Image: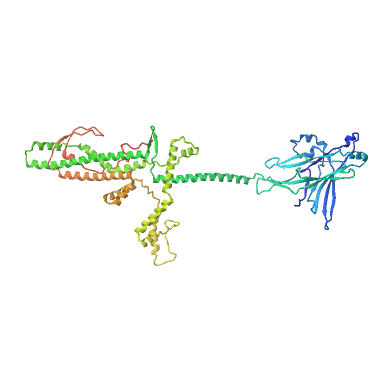
Amino acid sequence: MNPDYQEMNITNFMFAIKLDNPFQIYYPNDNKKAYDIVINQMEISTLANGTRIKTVLNQIFFEQCRDEHFKNLNYEGFQEIQADLSSYLCLPLNFSLKLQGTFNSEFFLYPALKISICYTNDCYTKDQIDYIAKNKSILVSLSTLIQSSIYMRNSKDNYLFRYLNSDFYLQTTFMEESKADIFFKNNKIIAENSILSLYKEEERKDFWSFQIYNQREFREYHDYPSVLFSLNFRISQDYEQNKKTAETIDSFLSYFGGILKIISTIFGLIALSYNEMGLKISLANHLYQFNIPKKKNGKFEFSYDKLLNVIQASLNRVSDLQQKLKQHTKTLVKTSMVMRVWNSQKFQNPNISHQQSQQRDYVETPQIDQLQFQKYVEQLQDYKGNFLQRLVTTFNSTRHDLRLGVNFILFEFLWCTCCEQVEITKKMLGQCKMVIDRDLDIVHLLQKIQEIDKLKSIILEKDQIKVFSYTPKPIININPTYQHQPIEDAKRIDLFQQLNLQKPKHKIRRQNYSLNKPKRLMKIYDSYSRLKQQHNNKKNQRIIQLLGPTIEMIFQKYYEIQNMAKGINYETNENIDNVNPQVDLQVDVALPENSYNNTQRVNAPKLDQKIIKFQQITPKDLMDKDELLNYD
């Protein structure tokens, strides 16, 4: 590599020397000049024929060092050198040294320092010089101060640290010449000071650095004292170029955008996990009923178990009412049969035996109070109208939907296990995730699809499958009320008319198909009752079992209520028709205390007690008067 042209000046370089003067030891009274010190700017050029010409361009002489020579120097750690600075000789403040190329280059520039014995009139005499030169134990030392610089990348203010390198020195005798080549490495710094990337503002600085290993030394012997030291300043082929960039606005925005991207990615992952969990929870709320434990009075109560207790209590009340009504119905049937026999015997034989009289007294004394029976019938009519709707409402009102509340997210983020409700929710979420992952397994779904295909191939024929498998794609128009129009007038446009007529049927509507709605369950019950009438059909029995034990028992009990209400209406009407209207008997009937007001014994005709007019009772409020779930 051929180094380019470079220049040394006061801004980037300084060189100082100090020489031993043995003449002052031997001739202390003589204050004369001992050495000639000069730096020659050398130029070696190669001609076309290969001849190399060495030329001295100019000469630079040294002067006594002052602080101005090292004004940009950091003297920290070099206090001793600073105190002894006046004993050194420095290059002048306006010096300029030029360096270019190498020894084999066609054009070679280098400074050459030459220190030789002075033989002028103001110097020591030749005899004095020869006397000292004969003593080979006398040595002359050359000490140097070389200003070097280090680039401080992380420094904001002073990124160029200047220091003094004082390790290089040479030593020789008066009959020898010490030659050395010193290689200086030229470095560049490009500092960008603009905070806008579109506007370029650069500051370029050159500095020189020297390492002690970048030098080589030679020896040359002379017949008489002449040149003592020869130093050639060479430019090193090794160099460094550093670029210091300012913190621009766009880089800050880029950094800020990167941080935001990382943050958004983290929050995106959290949001994805939250949405995934929310989707699973939403599916779980629509597919499952949760049995959530709740601690009360030191014991755990499970929500679904509590709901089952309420449903079971309602079923038990209906069963008790059924037993009482069945018992009273049996009594009415026996009474009707006995009355028929007694009336027939009474008109045939006016002399009634004592046994028949007791039987008559037994019949005329009711086993169940008639007003109490009327109350039971009213309850039956109430159950007939509201039993199913009341239980469905209770079933819906006690649903515990699983939710990701703010408290759960906060406690989960803080890894806090102090809240028992959060731990219960966490366990329920784990169970829901396990069940949903199992139910939504793609292998399981594919198996179900294969089973549907098999079932379709069994039920349908080949041609039916082809027609059944074709599903036309729905057409989406810009306007829902758009009417298809033919491009050209035609006589027959049946196709367009059919499309326009059928289009409203494909209108997309958002419907809620929740199976837990009362109206929906009433429709399901109607279908259940029709299937129940065909109780011998095994397929219907299996379909009914798919409702689950809770809904099946509710439907079963409601079905019994409906049938019993119809039976009581029929039997009552039949008994009324069979009673002789000419009989007018009065008996004293003791009524129990009514739940609404206190009553006393009343005399009522037996005929009026048996004639009960059933009316459709207006449905009451859905909330039962009896015990329901009370949630805190």
436 left or right of 191 in image: left
Give the residue at x 20% y 32%. Answer: 600
Task: Give the mark count.
Answer: 0
Residue 322: quadrant of the picture:
top left
Where is residue 524? Give x, y as percent.
32, 48
Depth check, front residue: 20 or 549: 20
Depth check, front residue: 166 or 175: 175
Depth check, front residue: 465 or 606: 465
Residue situated furthest bottom in the rendering: 491
Where is residue 468? Give x, y as percent.
38, 59
User: Is residue 340 something one can see in this rendering?
Assistant: yes
Residue 328: quadrant of the picture:
top left
Give the residue at x 39% y 39%. Answer: 292
Colouring convention used in this rendered image of the protein: rainbow
Where is residue 74? Give x, y as percent.
74, 38
Where is residue 291? Give x, y as percent.
38, 40
Quarter the C terminus occupies: top left
26 left or right of 364 in image: right
User: Is residue 228 something one can see in this rendering?
Assistant: no
290 left or right of 21 in image: left
